[in-house]
Image (spheres, rainbow, N blue to C red):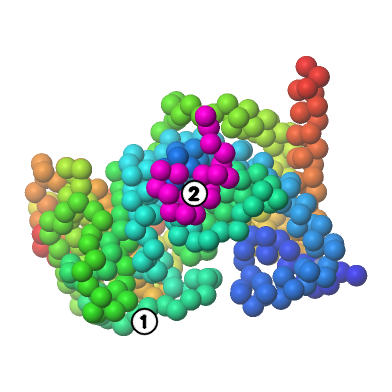
Amino acid sequence: MREQDIELFHRVQNKDEVALELLYDRYEKLLFSFSFRMTNNKFLAEEAVQDVFTKLWSKSLPYSEEKGKFSSWLLTITRNACLDLLRKKKSNDYELKERDALQEDNDPSPEETAEWKEQHEEIQHAIKELKTEQQEIINLFYFRGFTQSQIAKKCNLPLGTVKGRVRLSLQHLNKILTKKKERGIRE
Amino acid sequence: MMDKQCDLLLDYFNGHLTNQQKAAFESHLKDCPSCQEELKELEELTMDLPYASEPIAVPDGMKQRILSNVKDDSQIENKATFDQTDSEPGPKPPIKPKRTWFKPFMVAALTLSLVGNGAALYYINEQKDDADTGESFSVDSMKEAYTLQASEDIEAAATAMMIEQNRETNLIIQANNLPELKGDEKYQVWVLEEGKPFRAGTFVTNQDGKGGVSYTLHDMKERNYDTIAITKEPNANSQQPQGDILLSSPL
Ligand SMILES: [Zn+2]
């Protein structure tokens, strides 16, 4: 039987190596792929994943179920780890052009996939329906982790409007996603 | 009423505030329903975005590296490759300028950190206390260590190590006191065979002029490298050295 994330999490916090490995296997690929999306650099992505598991292992972390899904919480920690690394490397505007070098991934591990794949396609499609400016602002804000003023500069916007644009773009994306989900149910 | 603090929400969300700014914002957040709501909204609206990432294959050996590093990572406090302005509070080990901080038996922990597609990056940790020796390597076996000589007018210092791992040779470079890079400039490591240079890792330095890289030399057995050198290159793409040799050592 698949153990609940939360249970594994507590065991990892108590330095249970078996649980560490189970949790690692469960999230390795999602966290790595997300970290790569954030950093565009395999080394940083691996380091981010390592930072996340190091935290889970050696720090007492305040996750509880009221905070929502464990996976969302874990992804937030992962994102913060990536942002920290990017800041330290000062490489927000320094991209190793690595995408070409990446292996296509034709071998998805069994567990991750069904759910991730479905969500992935849904979101990809939804993002594509956004106007280019809105896609860009979500990319800069969420995935690149730009500061407000970097976004303003890059998008040629007055500083004071950035927050509103970010919200609007995210709200719009969410509306598209919700519509897709409703359609999905009806079909 | 919009408070000036309310404008910091995005930078708070992305972790860009200094500790002081962060504390101020968090105290504002307690009393500002509109920030509370917007923050919650941001969290909810971005919750599914990680799944937009393209699934990619993880680097070979990542699991083993990470799990073994994680388990003996508690003593790691300092990564020489990155700058030391960590946002997390806590005492920092003192950094002695120009110390010869690499000697095999003085390395507190050598952590294999990042490997992908043949290249590896190791971190060598500053040792907290000179008396505190005896920690072991977490990698397979060290073959050779070299101290690179700085060219004239160069203050920098660097060490190179060859480590055998999984029957491959990892070349690990750590450098100190390198001049600051500008723009796209990168430091490039080369290994030379009879004067012919081969790329062997690219790195950037932190504010303290420290940096390092590890690189897998797949063809070490077949080749007869005689020299290792570091140059400063205009970007990460130089196929031939364009800058002068800053540091070098015979192999
Ligand atoms: Zn506010």
Residue B130's x, y, as percent? 25, 79
Tag 1, which chain? B
User: Which residue appears at 40% of the width and 69% of the height?
Assistant: B77
- Mark 1 nearby-residue class (10 Å; few <14, some 14–19, many ≥20): few
Q: Mark 2 points at which residue?
A: A11
Q: Along the line of sight, which residue is nearer the eye, A91 or A57? A: A57
- Mark 2 nearby-residue class (10 Å; few <14, some 14–19, many ≥20): some
Q: In this view, does B39 lie to the left or right of B209?
A: right
Query: Could one spot residue B205 in this view of the protein?
Result: no
Residue A111's x, y, as percent? 51, 29
Residue A4 on the magenta span: yes
> What's under tag 2, amino acid-wise?
Arg
> What's under tag 1, amino acid-wise?
Pro
Question: Image quadrant of residue A70?
Answer: top right
Q: Could you tell me which quadrant the N terminus of chain B lies in?
A: bottom right
Residue A158's x, y, as percent? 77, 62
The span picked out in magenta is A1-19
Tag 2, which chain? A
